[in-house]
Amino acid sequence: MSIATAFAPVARATYALAGAPHLREPHEATFEHALLRDPALGFETAPSSGIGCLVHGAPSRLDRWHYHDEYELHLVVKTRGKAYIGDEIVDFAPGFLALIGPSVPHHFVSHDVPAGGVAVRSLAIQFSDDALRQTAGLFPDLGEALRLLERARHGIEFAGMGEEIREHFHRIRAYRGLARFAELVALLSYLATWPESHPLSMDRALPRPSQEVTERLSSRIDKAVGHICEHYMDDLSLTGMGELAGMGAQSFSRSFHRVMGCTFVEFVTRTRITKACHLLRHTDQQISAICYQVGFNNISNFNRHFRRLRGMTPAEYRSDKAFLQSAGA
């Protein structure tokens, strides 16, 4: 199993674990089909170059737990609240910018909407990567933008953006045809080098390697990553993983950190927490049972790592009222 397929997007975006015991109906996300987008809700009548721009306020009929086939760049202009992106929950405020991958369910819940509402809460750009990939063979410089899209399969947040990011959005909305496409490529290339970015949702357990070390070490580390993703509930040791990769324990430890951007122990912990999130959302199992099922050996250790990585306890994650309301539970 390769790094790219270790956490492939889940079909139909239900984010349920196949074969999980005591599986209940997951909180199904609404599929937003491009042909059914209503201009009255802020969508463009005829997106140019396959790049659609959306402006909507709050409250809005668009505020729901949903997903679609396109990538989405989502910029919050006004209000504060919580963004639900896959299994991740993050706070947002004006200036919050996220790139969300195809089929990843998401929903933005504003907590401070005034009585009269807000005319413009969010600006969004929705686009397919088809044109970028078709053009990349002729223009190698597009490789940077494509690598960003690979990183964004589950979502990326960009922190510290200034007013210039809103200007990019307005230019893309104002342009048509090739000019719109070129402006989007320029924006993606700009974001690809932005230093204050971090992955969201399932990708939090999958830091991206640098190009240089990937070419030399990825095949061995791929094998270890695939094993971890399939056997995360087992007792995984550094020595055992080193043997699997054909390396000594210390050499494997150093190589894993260089390729994955985190230690072997941290990657295993993040993988287990990600799996626990699925079970908390989509089953009725007791939290203590989930703790042991995903590979932790005591509940206090599980709770400590869950709070560190998700900013709340497992019980709070499961009972989050804003998410349950957005999912129609």
Image (cartoon, rainbow, N blue to C red):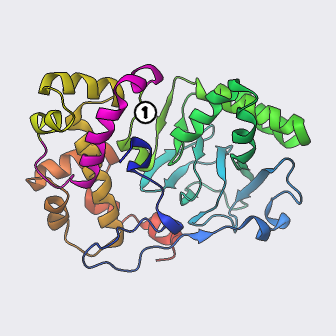
Q: Which residue does the image show at 25% across and 47% down from the upper left? A: 227
Residue lying at the far front of the rendered structure: 246
Q: Position of residue 271 (x, y in %)?
A: 29, 48
Magenta region includes residue 26: no
Res 86 seen here: yes
Task: Report whether 92 appears left or right of 183.
Answer: left
Secondary structure predominantly adopted by residues drawn in magenta: helix
- Percent across and percent down for residue 145 are 64, 32
Q: Position of residue 50 (x, y in %)?
A: 80, 51
Q: Which percent across, then down, holds residue 212?
A: 44, 19
- Residue at point 60% right, 28% down? 192
Instruction: Give the quadrant of residue 160.
Output: top right
Question: SS for tag 1?
Answer: loop
Classify residue 84 as left or right of residue 248. Answer: right
Q: Quadrant of residue 237?
A: top left
Q: Residue at x 16, y 33 (%)?
A: 242
Note whether residue 307 is visible.
Answer: no
Report the magenta residues as a range: 210-236
279 relative to 135, above or below? below
Task: Kindly identify the amino acid type of the residue bearing the numbered disc 1.
Answer: Arg
Q: Is residue 290 left or right of residue 239?
A: right
Is 252 on the left or on the right of 136, as rendered?
left
Q: Is residue 222 magenta?
A: yes
Q: Residue at x 84, y 47 (%)?
A: 49
- Residue situated furthest top in the rendering: 212
Characterize the local packing of mark 1: few (<14), some (14-19) or many (20 or more) Cα atoms within 10 angstroms.
Answer: many
Query: On the image, numbered disc 1 is attached to which residue?
Result: 208
Given residues 259 and 14, the one toward you in this image is: 259
